[in-house]
Amino acid sequence: MPVFTVRTRIAASPARVFAWHERPGAFERLVPPWEPIRIVERTGGLEVGARTVLEMRAGPFPVRWVAEHTGYVDGREFCDEQRGGPFRCWRHLHRMLPEPDGRCTLEDQIEYELPFGLLGRLADRLAVRSKLERTFRYRHAVTAADVELHARLAHTGPLRVAITGSHGLIGSTLVPMLTTGGHEVVRLTRPRAGAQVPGEHATWDPARGVLDPRSLEGVDAVVHLAGANVGARRWSASFKRTIVESRVGPTRRLAEQLASFSSPPQTLICASGVGFYGHRPGETLTEESPAGSGFLADLGRAWEEAARPAIDAGIRVVWMRLGIVLSPVGGALARLLTPFRLGVGGRLGSGRADTSWISIDDAAASVCHALCTTDLRGVVNATAPEPVSQAEFTRTLARVVRRPAWVPVPAAALRLAVGDMADEALLASARAMPARLEKSGYVFRHRHLEQALRHVLGR
């Protein structure tokens, strides 16, 4: 029977790493973003007898996997076995092995066997083993980085955090990142949306500003991520109004409500974007740089000003001006992957525009950092410290997916296809640097574009 083993030394005690695995959200943090896996049912945690039912895909076909925990040693190891799924048998032992210096080695050992005899052994050699290597390289990198982040921020103690947009691209990563660190999360959701995901929910109607103050009792901070996706479709006049109305009004109403509470949360963190700076070729932009011109710049000014009532009430407000968030689950990268994988990707326009980007893990981790860094307030550029030209972004993505990038898209064609969005979102140049984030002590997981792309794509 084949045995797959991977080990990684982690700068934390076995007990700390075990606790990370035992908290809510660990499974979500460990699922690679390139794997379409859905939790169908879950009973219990890591203890013996706990079960998880997953739905995944084998090519175009859905596959159900039933795993049951069969071994548990508190603070050291746990084991799960397949009770139903694609393997003939599967036994996965997770160990946190103590080291003399107080750190530990994280070890995953899997005994498995595929069905169909010789065909199964051939599939193992051609695909399964390499898939396991990709998956566990990702899992160990996430575990080590998350445990290190939480240890660095442990001085604040556990927080109770309310989040809008918790099901969105950043929110769906931020929630499990917080809960595996021992923090509590309250999802602020529209009516009926809360039933979709387990956990604590409170109803929030952003259009009317309805938010029961009792639902935020004991909440230390609010993270506001909700807003219409600016790249969802062509920018018609009506869609521009939708973008503005989904951001400015709800942010103002949320800030006013928080300010009116007798015991408001101490911190409000709001998403913003580097579109605030407009098209600024040749400039290096920091948080001190003035706003640019155009729709996104005007939106950014109004969006950030909408939080003024919270500031006036003494709430610490942090605006996270995000660059392009790299994830295959959504956003710009998800839209680029198909043409690049087909070998028909290429630079946009001249390729000279500067692109400010950030990996999905750094986007979520920088919010965690802002939550726990109490002297950080105001505007923070949430961008990687090494922005690249659009041409370099194209070349790097093509290299990572092992395809040519020989089909450039002329600027005129982009303008014809998507209208104003071409000049403001696709061709605009903004070299935004994370000066305040780094000065406050944040340590980036992915400073280099190729490093980030290989992590989120498993390459």
Image (cartoon, rainbow, N blue to C red):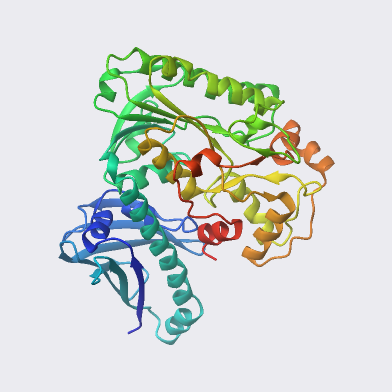
Q: Is residue 50 above or below residue 231?
A: below
Q: Is residue 376 left or right of residue 100?
A: right
Q: Position of residue 258 (x, y in %)?
A: 36, 18
Quadrant in the picture for the N terminus: bottom left
**Residue at 66% over, 65% down:** 399
**Residue at 39% over, 41% down:** 368
Q: Is residue 281 above or below residue 395?
A: above
Q: Position of residue 341 (x, y in %)?
A: 65, 61
State the count of labels: 0
Q: Is residue 46 above or below residue 181?
A: below
Q: Is residue 183 visible?
A: no
Residue 102 or residue 215, whichever sits in front: 102
**Residue at 72% over, 25% down:** 293
Extreme-bottom residue of the structure: 118
Q: Position of residue 413 (x, y in %)?
A: 82, 42
Residue 79 or residue 196, whichever sits in front: 79
Q: Is residue 312 visible?
A: yes
Q: Position of residue 38 (x, y in %)?
A: 39, 52
On the image, which quarter does residue 430 sit in?
Answer: top right
Q: Is residue 438 left or right of residue 136?
A: right
Extreme-front residue of the structure: 439
Quadrant in the picture for the C terminus: bottom right
On the image, which quarter does residue 404 sit in?
Answer: bottom right
**Residue at 47% over, 39% down:** 168
